Amino acid sequence: MSRSILRFLRAVFFEDLPLKFICLVLAVLFWFYIDGQLADERDIVVALTPADFSLPEGIEVAPDRGLPEIEVRVRGPRRRLQYLNSRDIRFRAEVPSPTRGRHTIKLSRDMFRLAEGMSDVSVVGVKKDAFDVDLIARSKRTLPVRVFTQGEVRAGFRLESAIPEPREVEVSSWQDLESAEKVLTDPVGIQGRTEDFQVNVGLAKTVQAGDREVEVSCPKKVRVALRISREEVTRVLEDVPVGVLAPPGAAMTIRPATIRVAVRGAPEDVANLKTADLRLFVEWPADWDLQRPPGESFPARSVQVKAIAPPRVTVRGENDQPLPTVKVYGTLTRPAIGP
């Protein structure tokens, strides 16, 4: 009996060792394959994002309201399930009648899809029946553009105007824009500027709506034309003499012989200006006939004074009125020359 047992053990463990080793390897491989193909189930938590909802243009999930995490049960080969994670499961939902406000989304396993190449895995259940989502609507409004300047022009100059083009733009926001009055440009630097210039500039990303600062979207840029001029001062000069321009053979007198004028220009041009630096005059009226006999007089007439001033200086009457008129008197002193 003992010999038979020994022969049996020898045949089992020692005879044809290579063949037995190959069989052992194949058995192990088949075991791993069959075990991997056995179906199993696993729970996976899927975090929802605003991009998971199909919404029309102008409607969006409220960013300040958190979306839930949904636990789903998936079924598939054990080998595949051990590498499965939430990024492999995609959620997509249609919101019925999407308008501003709160909506209830009823969940079903058909809303969840597995990533491409995972046809052997399926969603078999959802641990939640429904959840609420808040939607907001984008509001739009046309607002005037106001130029926001930064810095100061050089001393002795001033910013006359800053005109944007276009002067109005359409802005949009997820918040109410009813009380918004204007949209500012990005800062336009004018520090040390002395001449006119133009610049393309973007618009601010926020507007003031009442006591709230509201984020807005406006992709457009505007072109701003800025006009810079020298600062001017006005000075009144008293008793400036008025000259006459009379043709040959004629004499003309005026009343009054001096007037009061206002000169305007840069401070350094006006500060030391004297009456002798101005030339005020009146001209012989065009309808006074020079062909009359000598000694002929013409009745008094009011004629407006004209002026010749130094460069960059203007001469006006008081209170920025035109130069005044004076009374002129004309007399022919000898026959006019020529026909």
Image (spheres, grey):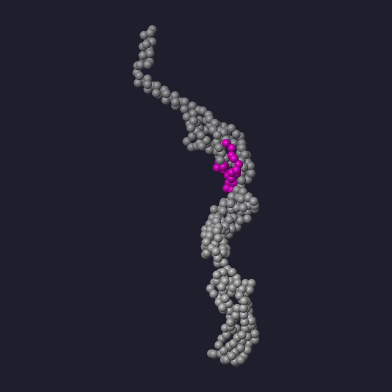
Is residue 168 at all visible to an observer of this figure? no
- Quadrant where the image shows the N terminus: top left
- Quadrant where the image shows the C terminus: bottom right
Q: Is residue 33 above or below residue 267?
A: above
Is residue 160 at all visible to an observer of this figure? yes
Residue furthest to the front: 272
User: Does the segment drawn in magenta span residue 57?
Assistant: yes
Q: Position of residue 137 (x, y in %)?
A: 61, 47
Q: Position of residue 45 (x, y in %)?
A: 55, 34
Q: Camera-side residue: 110 or 183?
A: 183
Q: Camera-side residue: 148 or 174?
A: 148
Residue furthest to the top: 1
Q: Is residue 177 above or below residue 310?
A: above
User: Does the segment drawn in magenta span residue 21?
Assistant: no
Count of marks, rendered view = 0
Q: Is residue 102 above or below residue 9?
A: below
The residue under the point 61% across, 37% down is 131
Q: Camera-side residue: 107 or 263?
A: 263
Q: Position of residue 54 (x, y in %)?
A: 57, 43
The residue under the point 60% across, 34% down is 128
Q: Camera-side residue: 242 or 177?
A: 242
Quarter of image, res 258: bottom right
The residue under the point 49% across, 34% down is 118
The residue under the point 63% across, 52% down is 209
Quarter of image, res 94: top right
Q: Report the span colored magenta.
A: 50-69
Q: Position of residue 2 (x, y in %)?
A: 38, 8
